[in-house]
Image (cartoon, rainbow, N blue to C red):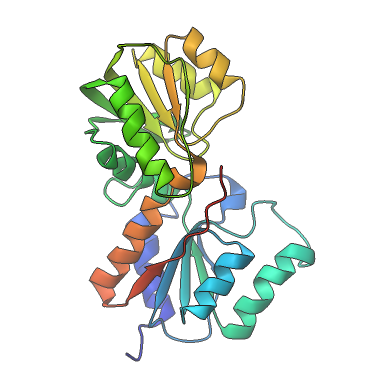
Amino acid sequence: MTGIALDRVVQHLDETLRTRDIPDSPGALNGLQVEGSRPVARVAAAVDASRGVITGAIGAGADLLIVHHGLFWGGTQRITGPLYRRLAPCLAHGLAIYSAHLPLDCHPTLGNNVLLAGALGLEPSEGFGRYETIMVGVAGQSDVATDELVSRAGRFAAERGGRVVVAGAVPGKRTRRWALVTGAGASSQVLREAAALGVDTLVVGEGPHHTAVEGPELGLTVIYAGHYATETLGVCALGAHVEEVFGIPWSFISAPTGL
């Protein structure tokens, strides 16, 4: 395969994810972060643009690496130390890096949140987790034993190198109204939003320690299913989407952080 022009792939991803319209932290730097030197004939997908992932993408023969967490969370910084050691192989091997943070989290079909809900057997009916002008997460109604939902989340996390922690477990409880925000989804703001909506069970990736105290006091069972694990689905869906649209094969590079 001769490959597809990088500009064409990037334009399609930008339009699909609405990277110019979705608000995000400036450090997210959504879109193409590193330009490649050749057409895209193979794609790799991963959660983080770590040195190990970049090495794995190069080893897999990828021309484009799609990630959820890009290179520049620290904002303007010198290209030295660990950042240099990530960038140097990309430039030497012509590997392009494309990053999609909140635009991928909130996408209605490819997003981490809607896909995690489906993986847990939950059907979203509305958005949840306001960030500026968007809803990052999803919410809905159900009638499932909370212990069963915890078990589903536990199996999901374990398959991706993680584990589940639960705050506010109540024996015999049933989850009737739930909300979900992947990644660093637990914050005081999110907890208060959930409680105000009558949510009884909140599924997140991770959160500050105080949320494990505050959540139960607001009447919530909080299921922490892991930052890394809960954000694996979006990049995989995006890789599969690129293959469907352009016929470019893709592979996922697993690199669990344990968080």
Determine whether 252 is above or below 181 in the image: below
Please give the name of the residue rendered at 39% of the width and 36% of the height, measured from the top-left corner.
Answer: 154
Please give the name of the residue rendered at 43% of the width and 55% of the height, measured from the top-left corner.
Answer: 19
Judged from this view, the residue extending furthest toward the bottom is 2
How many marks the image carries: the answer is 0
Give coordinates of residue 226: x percent, y percent: 49, 39
Q: Name the one closer to the observer, 202 or 157.
A: 157
Q: Considering the image in quadrants, where does the C terminus appear?
A: top right
Please give the name of the residue rendered at 36% of the width and 40% of the height, measured from the top-left corner.
Answer: 155
Query: Can residue 182 be seen at all in this image of the molecule?
Result: yes
Query: Can residue 22 be seen at all in this image of the molecule?
Result: no
Give coordinates of residue 65: x percent, y percent: 48, 69
59 left or right, relative to 158: right
93 left or right, relative to 114: right
Give coordinates of residue 9: x percent, y percent: 37, 73
- The quadrant in which residue 126 appears is top left
209 left or right, relative to 121: right
Give coordinates of residue 77: x percent, y percent: 76, 59
Q: Considering the image in quadrants, where does the N terminus appear?
A: bottom left
Q: Name the one closer to the observer, 113 or 26.
A: 113
Determine whether 61 is above or below 149 in the image: below
Q: Name the one closer to the observer, 76 or 259.
A: 259
Q: Name the one closer to the observer, 131 or 175.
A: 175
